[in-house]
Amino acid sequence: MAVRVKICGITRLQDLHAACNAGADALGFVFYERSPRHVTIEAAAALVRALPPFVQSVGLFVNAEPAYIESVLQAVPLDLLQFHGDETPTDCARFGRPYIKAVRVNRDTDLLKYVADFDVARGLLLDAYVAGVPGGTGERFDWSLIPANLTKPIVLSGGLTPDNVAEAVQRVRPWAVDVSSGVEAAVRMLDGAEVAAKGIKDPNKMAQFIARAKA
């Protein structure tokens, strides 16, 4: 089975085109103002209009007010919603749209209960647990914490890069993988260190990530 690839945190048209040309199956747009990858409703609408056929648009929300989500949905034709906060199953289902629920995984996480509680979700996105941060940390979690008998499709996230995505696919066998910071462009700091430019994607890293995941 070929794994699907979602590139999250798209903020620029050139990054959108590069991801699609490299073979991305879905692109994520962050509607969370505290994220450095946040996009406005107007910017997201313009980006989604530029998507080619058969590439899904995914809107990421974190404990957002229902009225705000409704305003996004009126302007942006999202294919899938991604809830990354403390939303209940009722919160996620109230919009009548397909959705996935993000779960921050540590040793105390009962993923089987999440599967039962979010029974109408299209899948679970598994990310690393970092206290006080809803996601996008670039941290990897212990993949052995994922039960082998989960009955929902798994989207594996958290600390994935072009260097480790092949290992992740081989070990976890997820339905899809999700990456944001792992394919961002590097900026050299004054002390010579390189850090990711949050929200700015590197076309070569995206191409490598997608090719290695699908191979």
Image (cartoon, rainbow, N blue to C red):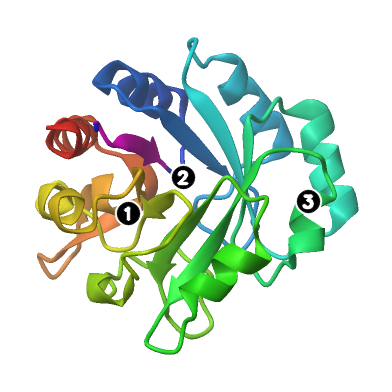
- Specify the amino acid type for callout 2: Gly
Q: CA distance from mark 1 to mark 2?
A: 8 Å
Q: Position of residue 147 (x, y in %)?
A: 34, 70
For the point 50% across and 50% down, the residue is 37
* Residue 89 located within the stretch drawn in magenta: no
Note whether 136 is above or below 43 in the view shown. below
Label drawn at residue 15: none
- Specify the amino acid type for callout 3: Ala
* Residue 5 located within the stretch drawn in magenta: yes
Specify which label sits upstream in the sequence, 1 or 3. Answer: 3
Q: Are marks 1 and 2 in contact (CB under 8 Å)?
A: yes
Which element type, helix, strand or loop, lies under badge 3? helix
Instruction: Judge by depth and name the residue closer to the eye, 148 or 127.
Output: 148
For the point 38% across and 39% down, the residue is 7
Instruction: Judge by depth and name the residue closer to the eye, 199 or 20.
Output: 20
Q: CA distance from mark 1 to mark 3?
A: 28 Å
Residue at mark 2: 9
Q: Main secondary structure of the magenta part?
A: strand
Question: Which label sits in the foreground, 2 or 3?
Answer: 3
Q: Quadrant of residue 209?
A: top left
Residue at mark 1: 181
Question: Which label sits in the foreground, 1 or 3?
Answer: 3
- Specify the amino acid type for callout 1: Ser
Q: Are marks 1 and 3 in contact (CB under 8 Å)?
A: no
Residue at mark 3: 93
| The residue stretch that appears in magenta | 2-7
Instruction: Judge by depth and name the residue closer to the eye, 156 or 52.
Output: 156
Q: Residue furthest bottom?
A: 108
Q: Are marks 2 and 3 in contact (CB under 8 Å)?
A: no
Q: Is residue 97 left or right of residue 171?
A: right
